[in-house]
Amino acid sequence: MYPGAIAAVTPDKPAVIMAGSGQVVTYRRLDEESNRLAHLFRAAGLRPGDHVAFMLPNHPLFLAVAWAAHRSGLYYTAISSRLQRDELAYIVDNCGARVFVSSAALADVATSITADTPRVELRLMLDGTAEGFQSYEEAVAAHPVTPIEDEVQGADMLYSSGTTGRPKGVKPTLALEPLTEPGPLFKLISFLFAPSADSVYLSPAPLYHAAPLRYCMTFQRLGATLVIMERFDPEEYLRLVEKYQVTHSQLVPTMFIKMLKLPEETRARYDLSSLRAAIHAAAPCPIPVKEQMIEWWGPIIHEYYAGTEGNGFLYVSSADWLEHKGTVGRSLLGPVHVCDEEGNELPPGEHGTIYFESAAVFEYHGDPDKTRSVQDPQGRGWTTLGDIGYLDADGFLYLTDRRSYMIISGGVNIYPQEAENVLCVHPKVADVAVLGVPDEEMGEQVKAVVQPVSMDEAGPALEKELIEYCRSQLAHYKCPKSVDFRAELPRHPTGKLYKRLLKDEYWT
């Protein structure tokens, strides 16, 4: 299924409801808007395999733009609306976009990259115009609402969050299949979470990220209604579940933590009984947090581990997780291997780099060295996301940390995720990052950078309290020697921490 097929049966059904404004986009409008823009792409000379990019906030027509590119057989790059000029210019130019779409709300940064993106032939702006941009609304109005004659499926080419360096574009092989071909993600979601046309899917994250974009488009293939939050707020999320009788949703662990820190009377105020599946991914979930969520919401918490690269997919239900606490699941798409630095496979229980054995083929656009760096050193065709972990005897995978975040202090490997998992549940901590900072004697020293619940409490007393709290649960060498306090940490709205930015501050 796809929006055109849904619109033919239930044209007036809401495809998108914007949580803040209440604005509704019906399946008829979703189909017609995407058809008009697809015709515009063809009129501009774009053919299957060409590239478009768009930078939008969570906008009512965000998914219409994505569907227009998808049904035109194009590569499409959705870009974070939080990027600054240099980052935005790099991605738009690097991906080879011939069309760039933005909105009046982002006009300042969108117009600032024109000189640095000479390959862009057409610039469109929603909700207004700016120098160098045509009005989106006027441009598409000249085109028909019927499908283009050569409809064929495109693919997203999304860029990493840039947590460990320059963002890299993950370019899949373009299959150019008919729109009626559902694809592997549709099959996985249907099998695991049993959605239907009656489902209501609440998306609290930015749509430009891989999981929200792909899951929202997949639920629209079923004819479900999406409720899109412009930005996440913990109590508002609970209110929306009750108001719209939400059945499915995808979150990240930081959202769980924020909801758990609401007052008990606030959490008890809302009826969440409509929820059938609460799916989480993107970052490891501390064991105490997930235990509390399962106790609160019941065994409807589903976790998966995967990447934008699409080279693997692990899954764990609440029941299996309770028997293997801390796991991110077992593989559903192919064998998982844990290897040492030379690529030798390690036995269960031993930590090493995680590799996926998969038929998925991808490359990092324009970066053959990076593409080779994630491939199995022994040439078996396996690929890695750069994570370290171990398998247990039952085949369940446990993540230790990102390889690039490992701290080496006095020759000892320390994984900061362990201390982060302890400190994030402390009642006075709103957010935390643990990283290695320079130390003349030990090479690196463990430091915590903490966003306290109240900045009024930031100071030596809280620093001492947090270090002692961490030492009460972990070996002392794994715990921070010092704590710095910040009003806010540089965290991506999808939950990923820009630890690179923090490390750069201390190492430069």
Image (spheres, grey):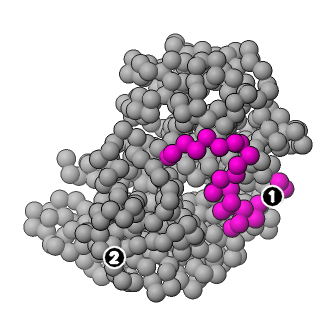
Residue for point 65% across, 53% down: 183
* Relative depth, front residue between 285 and 420: 285
SS type, badge 1: loop
Spot the residue most to the left.
441
Residue ID at (57%, 70%): 332
Quarter location, residue 148: top right
Residue at label 1? 196
Q: Is residue 182 left or right of residue 175?
A: right
Relative placement, left or right, of 383 versus 67 is left
Q: Earlier in the sequence, mark 1 or mark 2?
A: 1
Mark nearest the camera among 1 and 2 is: 2
Distance Cα–Cα, label 1 vs label 2: 41 Å
Residue extent of the magenta highlight: 172-198
Percent position of residue 448, x then y: 32, 63
Q: Is 176 included in the stretch rendered in magenta?
A: yes
Circle 1 crowding by C-alpha within 10 Å: few under 14, some 14–19, many from 20? some
Q: Write the residue at 44% across / 33% down.
A: 95
Identify the amino acid type marked 2.
Glu
Query: Based on the displayed image, in which of its 4 quarters is residue 249 positioned?
Result: bottom right
User: At which x and y percent is residue 262?
Assistant: 62, 64
> On the image, numbered disc 2 is attached to which residue?
345
The answer to whether residue 104 is visible is no
Q: Residue 100, can we see it?
A: yes
Instruction: Say whether residue 3 is left or right of residue 108.
Output: right
Q: For the image shown, how many numbered marks are present on the structure?
A: 2
Residue type, mark 1 in image: Ser
Q: Which mark is residue 414?
A: none
